[in-house]
Each structure stands twice: as structure tokens, then as C-alpha cells.
């Protein structure tokens, strides 16, 4: 939850109104960020620097329609990482904050693996390219009371797709290709919807080790995805295709589990969704 000290009631503003001038001195507002905020062993609360590698914060002034952006990285901000300070005039604001976790490849986006945007509908939306990611949004008011401290907990806004196929591949199969596309953006208001369009196409060869397919995992923003498996023989000719329709949920793993026979015979895979993550990942259960 969020502790707002020295804050007065919430207001709304139509996007068609003219900017309103606000009077009063600017107030120092500090946001103290934690990444995980529920009791999960082995620790009950993780600080931002224990979990995150970068933070992006956007503050939208409802009165002036202006947006300011504050970015932090572990290397650049060191001891100040996770403490965001802004000087704000009295008025109403919307804030959105995201943080990139340690896990995930970041795909081809590298440092831009997670990003934050405010839509024309007035909501903050976040995306992830195979990167663990956490977010938060809120509307708040600033009075002329100085030194406002806010304690913010970010929640995981991505889910994780896991593909587990047991059994040894027959010698006539040279490779297994996996492809799917998924929604890029998710609203930080509900971690389910998004007003921003855009999908990301993924195409990967599953790793083969000693004739067995290695587990495949990827962090994905919530939504529907159709996962297609394509098998190829030693001449590079496609043998068959198998489609598996799944749903991805924030802070949960969606697991496609089966055997090599499911690929060859195009029989149904087992699909499960749970909130149990890898043992080395500290996760807030929802």
C-alpha cells in the first residue's frame, strides 16, 4: 500500500480543459520504492536495489498537462537507487513507476527491455521484452505541506511462459521451432488491459541437449498467446505443426507440459497456471 503524508483529496480533470495555473511554493516529494511487499520467505520485504536493475518514473501534472520523467540505474544512482525525489507545485498528479528485475534476457531490447508510457486515456502502461518487471500507478494531490514522504511497493506486472517437453527426440528430428506473438503493453491500473496497441513476435529454436529438449521460459505481459511448435527432419523439411492456446497472467507462470509424443502425434499438452516461481526468485503471491 501507499502512505501519503500531508495529502488532500483526489480530483479529476477533463483532457479538454485549458491548463489551470496553480499557486504556491513547490513541495519536495520523495518516493521510497520497494519491489516486493508481502510476506514471502526467505525475506518479507525486498528493497529496490535487491531486486531491480533500473527504475523509470513518470509524473503527469493534471493541471498543466506536463509530464516529467525520472530514470535510475543501479550503476548511475548507487545509494540513491530506489529513492525518487521531485519538487512539485500544489495540484493533482498521476504517477507511474516501473522497475526492471534481474531475471530475463531482455531479448533484443537490452536496456530498453522495459518501458513506461501514458496513454491518451489517462492510464500508465508498461511493456516487457523477456524481462522480469514490476510496476505501480496512482493519482494523488500535493498540498503546500513540505517534505511529503511516500512508501511505494511495486508489484510484478509480467507473467512467465514455461515450456517443458519430456522424452528423447527420435533421430529423424533435427530441430523443434517455437513461435508465438503476445501483447506488448499492459495497464498498470489493473495489470490486465491496455489501451496501447502492439504485439511482439517471438521465433525460437528450442535447445536440444543429449537428444532432449531443454525447458524454455520467457517473461510476457498478460494476455492471450497462441504457441506453435514446428518439427523438422534432418533434411530441414517440416514434419508437422502443433498449436497450443494459452493465457498469461501477471505474477503467475503458465506452463505448457508434455512429451515428445505430443509433438509427433499432435495430441493435447497439459496446461497449468500457478504462482510458484523458481526457488531463487522472491515473489509476492497475489
Image (cartoon, grey):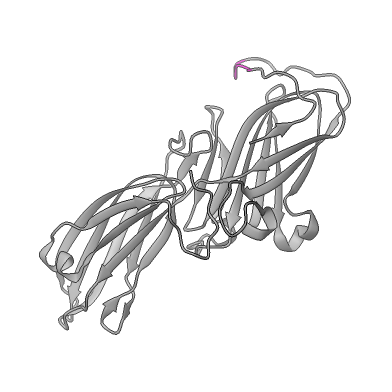
In percent of width and height, residue 267 lies at 13, 59
In percent of width and height, residue 163 lies at 32, 63
| Residue 13 among magenta residues | yes
Which span of residues is magenta-colored? 12-16
Q: What is the number of callouts on the image? A: 0
| Residue 127 among magenta residues | no
- Camera-nearest residue between 14 and 275: 275
In percent of width and height, residue 93 lies at 69, 28
Tell me which residue sits at (77%, 60%) in the image. Answer: 78
The answer to whether 38 appears left or right of 8 in the picture is left
**Considering only vertical position in the picture, is 84 above or below 263?**
above
Tell me which residue sits at (52%, 56%) in the image. Answer: 132
Main SS type for the magenta part? loop
For the N terminus, give its image quadrant.
top right
- Camera-nearest residue between 271 and 124: 271
The answer to whether 92 appears left or right of 179 in the picture is right
Amino acid at each position: 500500500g501507499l502512505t501519503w503524508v500531508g495529502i488532500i483529496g483526489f480530483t479529476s480533470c477533463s483532457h479538454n480543459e485549458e491548463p489551470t495555473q496553480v499557486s504556491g511554493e513547490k513541495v519536495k516529494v520523495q518516493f521510497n520504492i520497494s519491489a516486493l511487499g508481502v510476506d514471502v520467505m526467505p525475506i518479507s520485504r525486498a528493497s529496490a536495489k535487491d531486486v531491480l536493475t533500473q527504475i523509470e518514473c513518470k509524473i503527469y501534472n493534471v493541471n498543466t498537462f506536463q509530464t516529467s520523467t525520472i530514470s535510475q540505474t543501479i550503476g548511475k544512482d548507487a545509494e540513491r537507487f530506489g529513492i525518487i525525489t521531485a519538487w512539485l507545485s500544489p495540484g493533482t498528479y498521476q504517477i507511474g513507476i516501473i522497475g526492471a528485475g534481474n531475471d530475463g534476457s531482455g531479448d533484443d531490447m537490452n536496456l530498453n527491455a522495459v518501458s513506461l508510457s501514458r496513454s491518451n486515456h489517462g492510464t500508465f502502461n508498461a511493456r516487457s521484452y523477456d524481462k522480469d518487471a514490476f510496476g505501480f500507478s496512482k493519482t494523488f494531490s500535493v498540498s503546500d505541506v513540505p517534505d511529503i514522504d511516500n512508501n511505494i511497493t511495486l508489484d510484478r506486472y509480467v507473467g512467465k511462459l514455461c515450456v517443458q517437453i519430456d522424452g528423447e527426440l527420435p533421430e529423424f528430428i533435427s530441430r523443434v521451432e517455437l513461435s508465438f506473438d503476445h501483447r506488448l503493453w499492459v495497464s498498470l491500473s489493473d495489470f490486465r488491459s491496455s489501451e496501447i496497441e502492439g504485439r511482439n513476435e517471438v521465433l525460437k529454436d528450442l535447445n536440444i541437449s543429449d537428444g532432449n529438449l531443454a525447458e524454455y521460459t520467457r517473461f510476457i505481459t498478460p494476455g492471450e498467446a497462441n504457441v506453435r511448435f514446428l518439427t523438422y527432419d534432418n533434411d530441414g523439411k517440416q514434419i508437422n505443426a502443433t498449436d497450443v492456446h494459452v493465457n498469461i497472467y501477471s505474477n503467475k507462470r503458465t506452463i505448457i507440459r508434455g512429451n515428445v509424443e505430443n509433438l509427433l502425434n499432435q495430441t493435447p499438452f497439459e496446461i497449468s497456471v500457478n504462482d510458484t516461481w523458481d526457488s531463487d526468485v522472491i515473489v509476492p503471491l497475489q
